[in-house]
Amino acid sequence: MEYRELIARRAAQEFKDGYVVNLGFGIPVLAASYIPEGVEVILQGENGIFNFETVSKVGEEDPYLADAACQPVRVLPGGSTVDIAMSFAIIRGGHVDATILGALEVDQEGNIANWALPAAPGKLVPGMGGAMDLLVGAKKVICTLQHTDKKGRSKVLKKCKLPLSAAKVVDLIITELAVMEVTPEGLVLKEVAPGVTIDQVKAVTEADLIIPDSVPEMVL
């Protein structure tokens, strides 16, 4: 299974019936395709759209409807659109049950960095967008990312090195190798991916991991 699908499938298992859920760019938006059977959630886009689904067939898209990741969507029965001020008032008011966001780095304290500085003189990279609002406004923050960068260096750190988007807000970290929970005692290894051993996870994780006596495999 391709790593993006694996992470998205596992992240979608965190959805509970009736949740209002916000999905970030990249891997997070893929989770909408793997919502467990029998679970109904209200997807919220910070651009002001509620209760929608992604349109996957060419020709069915509406040029006036897209989510915050610019993907074409359709509004489901009972859905609505609001202006962006109202959308962020809902986010900041604590009415989003869960958000799934990508990251460049995350650490054992629940700090997250998912934006970057200018890449070179005169060349800017994207800012954090609505992530800082979601990180402090959502009731549960789930971080999805590859476990290592292109050079094999851990993205799950003792302490983030990049500028933070928010401090001590992440509840759960999901990578293609493991599921880790941020707790007051530290970062707990909750699950490993199918075919992955605890030692393999430890070998590519800079953060200090608390290893329970039993660590099950992800059920995907």
Image (cartoon, rainbow, N blue to C red):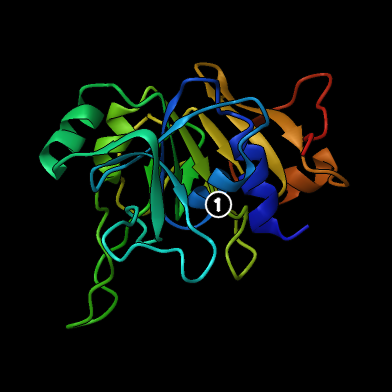
Extreme-left residue of the structure: 85
Write the residue at 66% across / 35% down: 179
Residue 21 point in image, percent of width and height:
42, 33
Q: Exactly how many numbered labels are in the figure?
A: 1
Residue 173 point in image, percent of width and height:
56, 37
The answer to whether 44 is drawn above or below residue 147 in the figure is above
**In this view of the protein, which residue sits in the foreground, 66 or 155?**
66
For residue 45, side relative to residue 153 (left or right) = left
Residue 175 appearing in the image:
no
- In which quarter of the view is residue 87 placed? top left
Locate the C terminus and report the quarter of the image it occupies.
Answer: top right
Residue 64 point in image, percent of width and height:
26, 61
Write the residue at 76% across / 20% down: 212
**In this view of the protein, which residue sits in the foreground, 130 or 165?**
130
Secondary structure state at the residue bearing disc 1: helix
Locate the N terminus and report the quarter of the image it occupies.
Answer: bottom right
Crowd tier of the residue under label 1, counting other residues whose Cα lies within 10 Å: few below 14, some 14–19, many 20 or above: many
The answer to whether 101 is drawn above or below residue 58 in the figure is above
Residue type, label 1 = Leu
**In this view of the protein, which residue sits in the foreground, 203 or 19?**
19
- In which quarter of the view is residue 197 placed? top right
For residue 85, side relative to residue 77 (left or right) = left
Write the residue at 23% across / 43% down: 48
Residue 86 appearing in the image:
yes
Extreme-right residue of the structure: 195
The residue to which callout 1 is attached is 30
For residue 170, side relative to residue 147 (left or right) = left
The answer to whether 137 is drawn above or below residue 57 in the figure is above
Residue 219 point in image, percent of width and height:
79, 34
**In this view of the protein, which residue sits in the foreground, 71 or 15?**
71
